[in-house]
Amino acid sequence: MSTAAPAVVHTIEPAEPVGPNLWQRFSATRIGRWLIGRIALIAVLSLQIALALRLHNTAFEDEGLYLYAGHHEIAWLLHHSNTYDDYATYFSGAPFLYPVLGAAMDGVFGLEGARALSLVFMLGATCCVWGVARRLYGRPAAACAAALFAVAAPTLFLSRLATYDPMSLFLLAFSLWIVVATARRWAILVLLAVPPAVLAVGTKYAGLLFVPTIALVSVFAGRYGGRERATGEARHRGWAAAIGRGLLFSGAFGGLVYGWLRLLGPAYLTGITSTTTDRASGGDSLGYILRMAAELGAGVALLGFAGVVVDARLARADGAKRGEVVSRMLLSLALAGTALLAPAYQVHLHTATSLQKHVGFGLLFAAPVAGVALAGLLRVGGRDPRRLGAGLLVCLGLTWGAITQSTQLYNGWPNSAQMVADLKTQVRPVTERILVEEDEVPRYYLSDLTEPYQWFSTFTFTYTTKQGKVLTGVPAYQQALADQYFALVVLRFGPTAALDNQIDAPLMGKKGYTLIAKVPDSDEYGTGYYYIWRSDNS
């Protein structure tokens, strides 16, 4: 009697693969887990790049000045060539730091290369914002914080500006991240945050305004400790140890800055006082400064102060003790309150100059706690469509406003391409003197054809007459024009319009000068013209 073979029951289809698929295998690797945990950050960085690269214009006055100076600093460092200027006495940052680095990129890749360096710095700052918020408030807040900072108008503007600011802002962000990242570790590790903070201030002296916030965060983050990666619980240390941590950072920072100033000499101290600590007051009204500051950063600042309250409520809901809630509120207030420092400083100086850049420094610190408020709104909104809609409207409104404002900021100076092209056909190397309103821009573009001593600006000028009399201000310009001291004169009736109107009469009367070009330009104030005059004797 034969026994029938047992029936085979297939639990899976023969064609179905056995084991984890490709995505599962990738997500199980260390790099896979790392990338998956940062998908939101990668998306934010991609958005920041896209929104920044849409901005286009010719060189800004400050870009031309710093890159031009950087090339001469490099020539001095390599060949001890004459720089024809003592940049340290009037630059708002050490000329051997960013100008040299920016000029190196400019020398290889041109202006777009120098601007690409700024974009890299600002992307690094966004990463630091994400890292700070993740450690202090968790991943949802980190994603929102990075997005709020990345698409803010000052961030997009600085991402395409070849000046000190992006490098200084990144170094401050890096220092802040180190302070937070070492909050649960040995107190001495806070010293790792000192060198980038000192470099940030050396790169742009106004960065000193934001160093006290880093010191405060070192205390409050040391006390609170941030959330543990696995449990979400906070690890605390006593107030005495936390304060000692802050004093260690502050003392090391002060000592390093003092040694740096002693080493560099009095020229740098002159530059610091004239551009930052004892800067001359302007004439802008309080209302204008506050309105401009509100347009640039009020959204993130308001979310930051709301985040202080939201985080405190979350802490109480999690059963945190009163001391922990207080330390968390102090930490959040220190971050959010920093958004007010730049506007307050500009109000003190009665000037809106550089406010569009300085506001971005404050947003760097306010963004992490602002992310708490936005994440809370979106999270609660998941159960309430109305609140979800409100959160999405906030995101859409801030993004649209930032796109519009950054475009206006980047179109705030005239496109000088045609003026430079016309001037290029007229300049004669070595011998001719050229007077240009905002001469930094054509001087930068025509640096391969001219020497530094050929250029003169409408901001300041001293002239010695044939009789040996020394003149300054308007009389100096008028006499120099009467003597046909300048071979070429370019006016556009912009920042020095009052002076232009006083010296323009001899030119318009054709007393020795002929108008050879009238080049249209447009900026935030409307349409105007570059007027290019040539001396009849040249």
Image (cartoon, grey):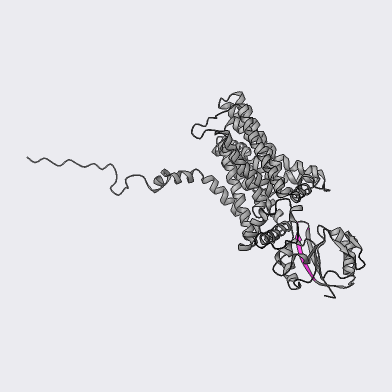
Q: Residue furthest left?
A: 1
Which quadrant of the view contains residue 479?
A: bottom right
Front residue of 525/230: it is 230
Instruction: Give coordinates of residue 254: x percent, y percent.
Output: 68, 39
Front residue of 121/517: it is 121
Which quadrant of the view contains residue 311?
A: top right
Which quarter of the image is occupied by the N terminus? top left
Instruction: Give coordinates of residue 150: x percent, y percent.
Output: 62, 47
The reply, left or right, for residue 412 in relation to residue 465 is: left
Instruction: Give coordinates of residue 313: x percent, y percent.
Output: 61, 29
Q: How many marks?
A: 0
Instruction: Give coordinates of residue 279: x percent, y percent.
Output: 79, 47
Front residue of 354/474: it is 474
The reply, left or right, for residue 263 in relation to residue 177 is: right
Location of residue 103 with respect to 378 vertically, above or below: below
Most common SS among magenta residues: strand
The reply, left or right, for residue 341 in relation to residue 461 is: left
Q: Which residues are magenta?
A: 517-525
Which quarter of the image is occupied by the C terminus? bottom right
Q: Residue furthest bottom?
A: 537
Residue at the location (64% across, 58% down)? 114
Q: Report if residue 392 is visible in the image.
A: no
Location of residue 164 with respect to 343 vertically, above or below: below
Residue at the location (93% across, 67% down)? 467
Q: Report if residue 252 is visible in the image.
A: yes
Location of residue 447 with respect to 143 vertically, above or below: below
Which quadrant of the view contains residue 320?
A: top right
- Magenta span contains residue 332: no
